Image (cartoon, coloured by chain):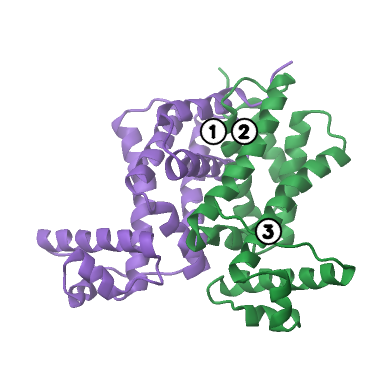
Chain colours: A green, B purple
C-alpha cells in the first residue's frame, strides 16, 4: 500500500495552478507514458516553472498517485453524487446511471485506461489497491441493496468484480477502441442481461 | 494491424528450443517488463546463444507478438477444444467450462495480464487487435447460440465484451490479486447471475 501526502493549495490561484499541472501530466502520461515523461516536460506543457510543480508534488511518483486517486474519485464518488442528484429510487436505476456516468467519464479522459493500467508496471500494489478499493465500496453498496431486498442473494464481492469487469470492457470497446454506438443503447443492452439473465428460458 | 512472420521449426529439437526461448521470454517480460528485457537476457535465461533466438524470431518485438498470439490461442482455441472434449451440450455449459478454463490458464501463466496489457504501451494497435479478435470469435459463438435458441436476443458484440470483462476482472481478483477462493465456486456465482439476472423479482 502506497501512501502519498499532498497538501491542499491555500488559494484559488493555487488550485488553478495545480489543476493546470494535473492536466498537463495527464496528457503526457497518456501520450508518452509515465517513464518517458519528466517533471520538466510537465512544467513546459503546463507553462509553469519546474520548481512550481514541487510546491504541490514531492516528485513524479507522487503526482502520478495523486492522478490515480483523482480518477478513483471521478469514477466512484462522482457516481455516488450523480445517483443522489438524479434521485435514483432503485439499485437497478443506480446501476444504470452509474454505468453511463462511468462511460461518459472515460470519454472525457481519453488516456484514463493507459494511465490507470500503467500502475501495473510502475508499482503493482498501486494497481491492486486501486481495484481492491473500488471493489470494497461497490461490495458495500451491493450489500445494502441486498438488505433493501433489491438484489438477490449472491457473493457480492464476486458481483462487484463482475460489474466492474463489464463496464471496463464495454468502455474499452465502445469508448476507447471505437465510438460508433450510442452509449445509452449499449448500457440498455447490458441492463437487459442483468434484468433477465443471458440464457433463454425453456 | 501488426503482421508477424514466424517460420515453424522443422525438427522436434527446434520446437523444444523455441519453447525454451518462449518460457524465458515470458518470465522476463513478466518480471522486468518488455522494455527492460533484451534478447541477450532472454538468451541467458533460456541457456541458448543470442544468435539462436534470431533463428526463430526476427527481433524482440516479433517474439513479443508471437507470445501474445500464443496466449490468444491458449485462452480461445484451447477453450473451444476443451468444450468439445467435455462434450458440452448447451451454451450455458460451454460458458461455464470456458470461464473455468480461462481462470485456470491465467493461474498457470502468472504474468499473463502484465504481458498482454503491456501491449497498450508497446503498440496500442496490438492491444486493440488482441481484444477485437477475441470478441469477434466470441460474438460468432453467441450468434450461433442464438440461432440454436439457447440465448435470448441481444446485441451479441455487447454480450461478448460483457463476458470478456467479467472473466478478466474475476481473474484479476481471484487469481492475480489473491488465490483465496475455490474457482469453481466463484464461477458458480457468476453463472447464477447469468442464469437469473441480478435484481430481485417482485
Q: Which mark is residue A67?
A: none
Dot 2 and dot 1 residues touching (CB under 8 Å) = yes
Residue drawn at (52%, 30%) of the image: B190
Helix, strand or loop at disc 1?
A: helix
Q: Nearer the viewer, mark 1 or mark 3?
A: 3
Q: Which residue is mark 2?
A: B153
> Is residue A199 in sight in this rendering?
no
Q: Quadrant of residue B58?
A: bottom left
Instruction: From the top left corner, tell me how far across and down residue A126 is, in percent.
Output: 55, 54
* Alpha-carbon span between mark 2 and mark 1: 7 Å
Q: Is residue A162 above or below residue A183?
A: above
Q: Quadrant of residue B20?
A: bottom left
Helix, strand or loop at disc 3?
A: loop
Instruction: From the top left corner, tell me how far across and down residue B2 is, in percent.
Output: 44, 69
Helix, strand or loop at disc 2?
A: loop
Instruction: From the top left corner, tell me how far across and down residue A36 is, in percent.
Output: 54, 77
Q: Which residue is mark 1?
A: B146
In the rendered structure, the residue with mark 3 lies on which chain?
A: A
- Locate residue B136 relative to residue A76 in the image: left or right: left
Q: Which residue is mark 3?
A: A179
Amino acid at each position: 500500500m502506497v501512501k502519498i501526502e499532498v497538501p491542499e493549495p491555500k488559494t484559488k490561484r493555487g488550485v488553478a495552478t495545480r489543476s493546470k499541472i494535473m492536466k498537463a501530466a495527464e496528457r503526457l502520461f497518456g501520450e508518452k507514458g509515465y517513464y518517458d515523461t519528466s517533471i520538466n516536460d510537465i512544467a513546459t506543457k503546463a507553462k509553469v516553472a519546474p520548481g512550481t510543480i514541487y510546491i504541490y508534488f514531492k516528485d513524479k511518483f507522487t503526482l502520478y498517485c495523486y492522478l490515480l486517486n483523482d480518477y478513483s474519485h471521478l469514477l466512484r464518488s462522482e457516481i455516488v453524487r450523480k445517483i443522489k442528484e438524479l434521485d435514483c429510487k432503485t439499485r437497478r436505476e443506480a446501476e444504470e446511471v452509474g454505468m453511463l456516468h462511468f462511460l461518459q467519464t472515460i470519454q472525457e479522459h481519453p488516456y484514463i485506461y493507459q494511465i490507470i493500467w500503467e500502475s501495473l508496471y510502475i508499482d503493482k500494489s498501486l494497481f491492486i489497491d486501486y481495484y481492491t478499493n473500488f471493489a470494497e465500496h461497490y461490495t458495500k453498496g451491493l450489500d445494502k441493496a441486498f438488505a433493501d431486498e433489491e438484489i438477490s442473494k449472491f457473493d457480492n464481492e464476486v458481483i462487484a468484480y463482475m460489474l466492474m469487469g463489464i463496464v471496463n470492457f464495454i468502455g474499452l470497446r465502445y469508448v476507447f477502441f471505437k465510438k460508433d454506438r450510442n452509449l445509452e443503447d449499449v448500457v440498455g443492452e447490458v441492463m437487459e442481461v442483468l434484468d433477465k439473465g443471458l440464457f433463454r428460458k425453456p
